[in-house]
Image (cartoon, grey):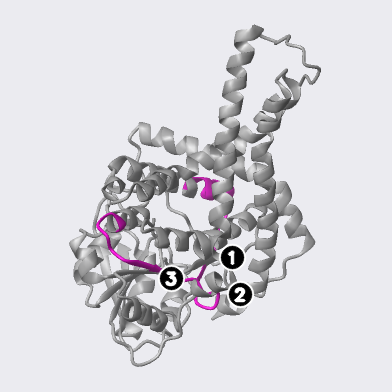
Amino acid sequence: MRDDGESFPLWGLGGLLLSTVVISAVSMALFWMAAFTLWWQMHAWRTPETLAATRFEAPHGNDGLAFSLLLPARHEQAVLDHTIQRLLESSHAAFEIVVIVGHDDPETAAVADEAARRDRRVRVITDTHEVKNKPKALNTALPHCRGDVVGVFDAEDQVHPELLAHVDHAFRSTGADVVQGGVQLINFHSSWYSLRNCLEYFFWFRSRLHLHAQKGFIPLGGNTVFVRTDVLRDAGGWDQNCLAEDCDLGVRLSSIGKKVVVAYDSDMVTREETPGTLMSLLKQRTRWNQGFLQVYRKKDWKQLPTFGQRLLARYTLMTPFLQAFTGLIIPLNVAVAIFLEVPVGVAFITFLPLITAFVTFVFEVVGLHDFGKQYALKVRLIHYIKLIVGGPFYQVLLAFAAIRAVWRESRGNNEWELTSHVGAHLSPEEIRA
């Protein structure tokens, strides 16, 4: 970097001019991406009133709706029975549990059938598709749903007994077509990446989805989502060819003006576990990224009525790729500013993304503290160190998942890569029970 006012560019005047323009443009783009990330992360914490408004209202009066709770399970015999038992403990008066198992998965089917024998509120539906995935399983069960509202859970979910009562009240008090509850990964101590994975969920469900609901465009979460049965059937259920069927459903319902209410309460969240291995996490993120790309290419979001909503949709659906690009390009940008001969003003611009990234990082540290406080988890110094050290490596993983998603989509590979579960989010007492 030169600060003596001389002009002796490395590649000549034309090369310097071109590199200056490119570096400045990339730096400003990175700055605004980082600033937007910080904005949505802080959305729920803007004021105490905003934070309070993100929670469920306390229900009052009698239950008014009946629920059909869909529980797709594939090779989930290790965790399925615990999830069914937790759902059966619900305080709500009217619900059924519809477990969907594959015709080629006898171990999981045996667990589901035994639960159905013990309690008549449990029914088992068999998915006979030769090639299986989650949306196909959900669509198989949809015609059999008897409730006013369809809810979706995963086979490893730990669900609060009062959740359905709160969701029922949210539907009746707001006139919502969809209610999205909170989901939280809990086992932050399992590995260096599980800590960041848990924090991602914390910010996504605690803050960002509330922003999306407020703006009238929302990519729904994969579970603890409740949709009025008639609305879901009118929409044709889930897109069984999409690898992010939850996001796709949210985009389609947003595009036709359906009302979505989001609520996050640490007492009411559905607790889950992080993927058990790096490869499992990579495959999960690849599936999500590829699904977002599919939803983007379907262009349902273009039906949104306002330019602002369409802009938010475009940015959101491309976020995985933008985040990966940001994480990789910021260090390169800083290196260019330090080691190449660029004007002082341009060098300053290259550091702008680093400033917002640093503020975001500080907010993540505060968020980790808040996460531990809300869930009564002991966050120690080593966890903050893992958060700091693991950040760059996590960005590399996200970048590789994004590249892998583009590669798979370009080759027409839509195979569903299943994420296995072992109950890492459960306490020893819960596992024994």
Q: Which residue bears the numbered disc 1? A: 45
x 20%, y 64%: residue: 233
Q: Secondary structure at mark 2?
A: loop
389 left or right of 127? right
Mark 3 against mark 1, which lies toward the viewer?
1
Q: Position of residue 189 (x, y in %)?
A: 67, 62
Q: Secondary structure at mark 1?
A: helix
x 45%, y 74%: residue: 83
Q: Earlier in the sequence, mark 2 or mark 3?
A: 3
Q: Earlier in the sequence, mark 2 or mark 1?
A: 1
Q: Which residue bears the numbered disc 3? A: 80
Q: Which residue bears the numbered disc 2? A: 427
Rendered position, 215 above or below 97: above
Quadrant for residue 400, please give it: top right
x 35%, y 61%: residue: 105
Amino acid marked by disc 3: Leu
- Circle 1 Cα neighbour tier, 10 Å, few/some/many (<14 / 14–19 / ≥20): some
Rendered position, 345 above or below 154: above
332 left or right of 339? left
- Circle 2 Cα neighbour tier, 10 Å, few/some/many (<14 / 14–19 / ≥20): few
